[in-house]
Image (spheres, helix red, strand yellow):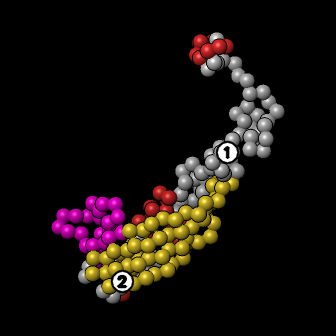
Amino acid sequence: MDLPLRFRLRSIEEGARRYAIELSAAELGLPDGGGIEYLGPVAIDLEIVRSGEQVMARGEARLRVRQGCVRCLQPVETDVRAEVSVVGRKPGEGESATDAADGMIYHDGESFDLAGEIREVILLEIPANPLCRPDCAGLCPRCGADRNAGPCGCTETHAVDPRLAALEALRRPPSER
């Protein structure tokens, strides 16, 4: 292993070998910002099986992230678990690294790097719309108060666009129309 997730083929014996690796989010190349804060290291457990020039890596990457709830903006901490499954081989005639399908990497016969594949599966597992709780009431659109803490003091009535007034009547029970 050279860089944290670059492995030399010669250093991996035929058969299976297990690796436990801890990296910071920066070492793995996870993007900064975007409302995501990485809490602690990324723990990666891998089993790499080598058969000739073909390798298969399976395992799991785990980390904890903090994001803002999409409804009320309160911080939300989430444990992220990403399954890793990658097959690596030398490219065939006329194939290049950009031709590799998902879960497939090409190597040069000397070494292979799993950082890009692991980074991708982690990013796909981070919640896109985190909630502090499933029934989060969010913020009041008028005054901005957190409705999880209780009702806000403003009135929630709103003026109906006169063009839609007839549709507003459909919301009432038939006996009140």
The disc placed on residue 171 is: none
Residue 71 belongs to the span the image colors magenta: no
Determine crowd level at label 1: few under 14, some 14-19, many 20+ residues with C-alpha closer than 10 A: some
Type of the residue with mark 2: Ala
Q: Count the numbered circles shown.
A: 2
Residue 26 appears in view: no
Residue 77 falls in image quadrant = bottom right
Which quadrant is home to the C terminus? Answer: top right
Could you tell me which residue is drawn at 50 percent across and 69 percent down?
A: 61
Judging from the image, what secondary structure is the residue with disc 2 in?
strand
Please say if the residues under marks 2 and 1 sit with CB atoms less than 8 Å apart: no
**What residue did someone put label 2 on?**
16
**What residue did someone put label 1 on?**
136
Query: From the viewer's perspective, is residue 119 above or below residue 177?
Result: below
Residue 163 falls in image quadrant = top right
Which residues lie in the magenta part?
86-109
Determine crowd level at label 2: few under 14, some 14-19, many 20+ residues with C-alpha closer than 10 A: some
Q: Percent x, y for residue 136?
A: 67, 45
> What is the CA distance from the residue labelled 2 to the residue labelled 1?
46 Å
**In the image, is 37 to the left or to the right of 58?**
right
Type of the residue with mark 1: Cys
Could you tell me which residue is drawn at 79 percent across and 30 percent down?
A: 154
Q: Percent x, y for residue 11?
A: 36, 87
